[in-house]
Amino acid sequence: MKKYQRCVKSRGYSQIEYPYEPVDKSLRIYECNQLNASPRPQYDNRDMSFNQFLLSNLAYPQSAQKQGISGTVEMFFVVEPTGRISNVKILKPVGAGCNQEAFRLLKMLKWMPGIKDGQAVRTMMTLSITFNMADFEKHEYVPANNSNQI
């Protein structure tokens, strides 16, 4: 136990920091349409959009380029009240490294949690990232119409 506590302290995790207070501790997971404010990603540059984030960080996997593979990776995840993500599941895989690249991009983002009745809550989200060889040079992000999808 002492070794664990030293490890936690050395990594700076001695206490959980919440970007928004108060926090709902019920562990219930909400959908975006049940919230007062939906979760949103945070970027280093405040003027950046999700499309710009993808343009600057997306690296098309070499194996997908060699095989000419394209498609849309769809992922499910939960935004925690801390702003971190959990329970990541690939709903629609593409393969050839595209799934791993989409997962890497998702892990790079820090999120502001969803707000319900003035409290930060756990929120389920889906994210779709399209890998298209023809449009890779002019890669664009087109948001879905679903309210809990980014």
Image (spheres, helix red, strand yellow):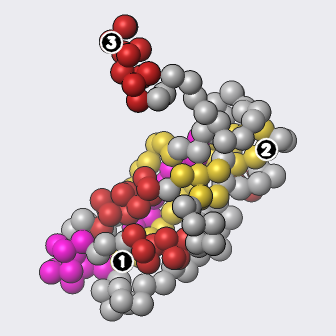
Q: Mark 3 points at which residue?
A: 3
Residue 135, quarter of picture: bottom left
Residue 6, quarter of picture: top left
Residue 78 is one of the magenta-drawn residues: yes
Mark 2 Cα-neighbour bin, 10 Å: few <14, some 14–19, many ≥20? some
Mark 1 Cα-neighbour bin, 10 Å: few <14, some 14–19, many ≥20? many
Q: Distance between the residues labelled 2 and 1?
A: 34 Å
Q: Is residue 24 above or below residue 2?
A: below
Q: Which residue is drawn at 79% across and 44% down?
A: 116
- 5 sits left or right of 15 in the view: left
Q: Position of residue 12 (x, y in %)?
A: 47, 29
Q: What element carries label 3?
A: helix
Q: Mark 1 points at which residue?
A: 131
Q: Mark 1 vs mark 3: which is more N-terminal? A: 3
Residue type at the position of mark 2:
Lys
Q: Where is residue 44 in the image (x, y as percent from the top left)?
A: 54, 61
Q: Mark 2 vs mark 1: which is more N-terminal? A: 2
Residue 48 is one of the magenta-drawn residues: no
For residue 116, which numbered disc appears in the image?
A: 2
* Residue range corresponding to the magenta coloring: 61-80
Q: Distance between the residues labelled 2 and 3?
A: 38 Å
Mark 3 Cα-neighbour bin, 10 Å: few <14, some 14–19, many ≥20? few
Q: Nearer the viewer, mark 1 or mark 3?
A: 3
Q: Residue at x 41, y 29 (%)?
A: 11
- Please state which of residues 53 and 47 is positioned toward the viewer in this rendering: 47
Kindly tell me whether residue 10 is visible in this rendering.
Answer: yes
- 114 sits left or right of 85 in the view: right
